[in-house]
Image (tube, grey):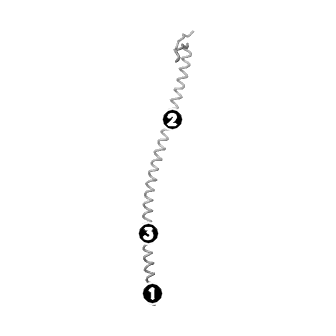
Amino acid sequence: MPPTIVLQRGDGSPAAATTENLEKRNEELEKELKRSLEREERMKEELERLWKRLMVAEEAEERLCNQLGELEAEAVDHAREYRAHITILMEQLSVAQKLLQDASINV
């Protein structure tokens, strides 16, 4: 017969446990620990994958922001060129109208 070990419960009452019961409980705890460590390892791997994805996303965001800034600067340049072109055309039209008015007065 295995020896009996007396343990104290949290409420102060004694609880008898055999070595067999303790070994069984120990095995259960070891299995739970193993599952917990495996779960922790999977979570670490998932965290690493997410971290890498985050780094890629941040780099992509930075590249897109740079491209957007370049496109905005290019759009401003185009708008200035367009405005200058319109101003030149308006001046040419004004000169042409003046020439037409002067020609019609002289006729």
Give the x, y percent position of residue 60.
Answer: 46, 50
Q: Residue at x 46, y 50 (%)?
A: 61
Identified by mark 2, the residue type is Met
For mark 1, what is the residue? 103
Mark 3 Cα within 10 Å, few/some/many (few <14, many 20+)? few
**Residue 83's mark?**
3
- Decide whether the magenta segment is chiefly helix, strand or loop: helix
Q: Quadrant of residue 71?
A: bottom left
Residue nearest the observer in this picture, 68 or 15:
15
Kind of element beneath mark 2: helix
> Are the residues tagged 1 and 2 within 8 Å (C-beta)?
no
Kind of element beneath mark 1: helix
Give the x, y percent position of residue 3.
Answer: 54, 10
> Looking at the picture, does residue 62 appear above or below residue 78?
above
Identified by mark 3, the residue type is Arg
Q: Residue at x 47, y 44 (%)?
A: 54
Give the x, y percent position of residue 56.
Answer: 47, 46
Q: CA distance from mark 2 to mark 3?
A: 58 Å
Q: Residue at x 42, y 60 (%)?
A: 73
Identified by mark 1, the residue type is Ala
Residue nearest the observer in this picture, 71 or 11:
11
Residue numbers of the magenta segment: 81-86
